[in-house]
Image: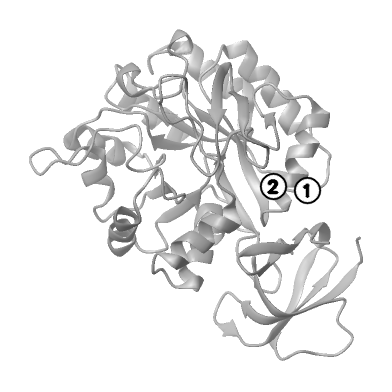
Amino acid sequence: MSRARLLLTAGAVVAADRDLVPGYVVVEDGRIAEVGQGQPRGADYEFPEGILVPGFVDLQVNGAAGVDFLTCTPEELARAQAFLASTGTTGFLPTFVTAPLDALKQAARVVLGSAAPGAQPVGLHLEGPAVNPARAGAHDPRWLLPPQDPQLRQLVVELGRSVRVVTLAPEEPGGVELVRWLTSQGVVASLGHTDATYVQAREAFSAGARMVTHLFNAMRGFHHREPGVVGAALEEGEWTCGLVADGFHVHPAAFRLAFRLLGPGRISLVTDAVSALGAPAGRYRLGYREVTAEPPGPPRLADGTLAGSVLRMDCAVTNVVRWGVPLRDAVRMASTTPARAVGLVDRGEIRPGLRADVCVLEEGKAALTLVAGQVAWQRA
């Protein structure tokens, strides 16, 4: 359903500057026109027990609803977009793991050409192929390339401004130089699948790296004599750390520690979801590799290696609240912080003038999702 003007009321609204209990939002022509306290009559949608929050922005999602973004058709992509909207996600970065360069280009054409409703692609996340073979995780080692390989820069140039994030290992030959070059191109360089030491990570941050891909996972672990990427990332700085809050990738205690040090302005909740998200237990694809999913546990390769997650964004928010994070901070980490990390200033908050990308949470799950003021999901 789509209308030029909509009035939504909820038991609470997590607005940009304060919480409104109860509250309402007026949407006009796809944007937020008014935010206020109370429950005006004549609402198009009423959720007296619901919480109206900004739509979620997922910076790392490989697929959903049985669909892998690296190999999908336009029709399959549309199915995944519809499912992601049902999780409260309004914008996302289709994430491509390491694969042949021609396959990456073809996948980019498919996902960027989408005109389907639902959650909307807001760019691309190239997770690899310039990662460390020793920390490759579920990435296919056949297609890895060193950061100094000129084909990588050519790929980014060909894909243009659609590339928002590139995950790389800065300790590999040419890694820091690639960080500098990506930064000069307006691309966010993210440290991930890396064995970098503390000194190497700090050098990459100094060179312009502004993100860490799934903090704690696929990187050198923290040690009191060699803090590694984790130790460098948890220090004061301008970079954002992605965290997979499914309870499997990161223990709740580790999440709380990161939250205490970084705060909600430097943590971006990500799902790292694969095609098994929203699908029955079974075998699925992550790029060109087969993974086995037996929810609620994470998907794995045949050798037991973690291979993404089946985490919903609304469940990620619910999880961190259960772990002791205030709801307002949890919502910020799923919306405002990731949006700002990749330069999206027109969404991520409930504030007049911004895109009407919002969702209503009831009992920890999305009940209604609007994308640019249009209903992308409504629970029956």
**Does residue 30 appear to the left or right of 297 in the view shown?**
right
**Residue ID at (45%, 34%):** 184
Which residue matches tag 1? 118
Classify the position of the C terminus by image quarter.
Answer: bottom right
Classify the position of the N terminus by image quarter.
Answer: bottom right
Question: In x, y percent, where is residue 108?
Answer: 68, 25
Question: In x, y percent, where is residue 145?
Answer: 42, 13
The reply to whether callout 2 and callout 1 are in contact (CB within 8 Å) is: yes
Q: Tag 2, which secondary structure?
A: helix
Foreground mark, 2 or 1, reads: 2
**Residue ID at (38%, 14%):** 146
Question: In x, y percent, where is residue 329?
Answer: 46, 68
Amino acid of disc 2: Leu
**Does residue 350 appear to the left or right of 196 in the view shown?**
right
Q: Tag 1, which secondary structure?
A: loop
Query: Residue 84 — which label?
Result: 2
Instruction: Give the tally of numbered discs.
Output: 2
Question: In x, y percent, where is residue 106?
Answer: 70, 18
Residue 114, relative to residue 33: is it above or below?
above
Residue 353, relative to residue 34: is it above or below?
above
Amino acid of disc 1: Gly
